[in-house]
Image (cartoon, rainbow, N blue to C red):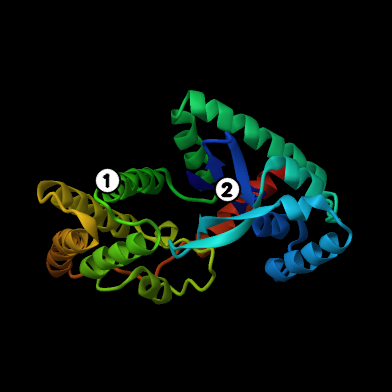
Amino acid sequence: MSNLILFESKQVRRVWNEQEQKWYFNIIDVISVLTESIDSGAYWRKLKERLKKEGNETVTNCHSLKMEAADGKMRMADVADAEQLFRLIQSIPSPKAEPFKRWLAKVGYERLEEIENPELAAKRMREIYKQKGYSDEWIEKRMRGINIRDELTEEWKKRGVKEQKEYAILTAEISKATFGMTPAEYKAFKELDKPKDNLRDHMTDLELIFTMLGEASTTEIARKKDAQGFADNKKAAIKGGSVAGNARRDLEEKSGTKISTKENYKKLTEIKTKKIRLDKES
């Protein structure tokens, strides 16, 4: 399980380890929060080198895990659990260190609550999107889309599709059949140039609806056809995406309006997030 959480409107990626029953946090994301460095990766490399020379076990105990990037692909990233982060933060001069440590402790407790009551996880995700400035209507569609996506990936797992690379290929096939663009091409179309930009977080209501239709159709076709392995599921992905693509073209023809739009939510969320922060300070 992996997801995003916010500290002062900045994203921090984390992965829950079921076996160890604890969170692992993306170190570069944490450094970005604490230092506001232009290149958090370079900051971490220099800090890691210095700590290694000092014999600091914080670094040697940290390890790497695959985490989802903004383009949906899984890439290796340096991670640390809460205890390691508490020690690491001592090496980063920042006025945000103490508030971040308090936040980190709260995050760990919240996960224990979510294990007991899974509905809390969905509620907190809704709150994050609301803080970023999204409307209630958009949030409901986004949450529904997440559930449909999870159902699809679970189906792929059952049917012998290999995670990460093959998931990305099948997702691209659905997107091409639905919108005529792969996710990477769609990001370029929307002028989303930052690695952390999540394409679906910048989709309009209708774009989300057709994305859901393509993925839900793929799940249904894979089940009905009993698709097994990558090749069968690729055919199902193309057919599922085509269901959504045909519906999209039909709506465009009847409405006279293109569904795919360059609109993204960067300015909207930046403005609303700033307003929320100012309201809290006043």
Answer with the quarter of the image where residue 51 lies: bottom right
- Give me the residue at 65% from left, 54% from top: 63
From this view, report whether residue 107 is shown above or below residue 87. above
Up-down relation of residue 273 to residue 197 (above or below): above
| Relative horizontal placement of residue 63, taking residue 267 as reference (left or right) | right
Task: Specify the quadrant of the image occupied by residue 102.
Answer: top right
Residue drawn at 40 percent across, 67 percent down: 263
Compare residues 213 and 229 and report the one nearer the observer: 229
Q: Which residue is mark 2?
A: 14
What residue lies at 69% left-to-right and 54% top-to-bottom?
30
Q: Which disc, if any, is residue 268?
A: none
Q: Secondary structure at mark 1?
A: helix
State whether residue 75 appears in this view: yes
Q: Which numbered disc, 2 or 1, marks the residue closer to the eye?
A: 1
Near-viewer residue (76 or 71): 76
Q: Is residue 271 left or right of residue 281?
A: left
Using a 10 Å C-alpha cutoff, classify the residue at mark 1 as few (fewer than 14 neighbours), some (14 to 19) or many (20 or more). Answer: few
Amino acid beneath label 1: Lys
Locate residue 113, reporting x and y percent.
55, 26
Question: At 54% from the left edge and 51% from the top edge, which residue is drawn?
Answer: 132
List the residue tagged with mark 1.
158
Q: Earlier in the sequence, mark 2 or mark 1?
A: 2
- Residue 232 in the image: state x and y as whole percent: 17, 60
User: Residue type at mark 2?
Assistant: Arg
The quadrant of the rendering that contains the C terminus is: top right
For the residue pair 77 and 36, the one nearer the viewer reads as 77
Report, in whole angstroms, how far the alpha carbon at label 2 lies from the one at label 1. Answer: 25 Å
Q: Secondary structure at mark 2?
A: strand
Residue 96 visible from this viewpoint: no
Occupied quadrant, residue 168: bottom left
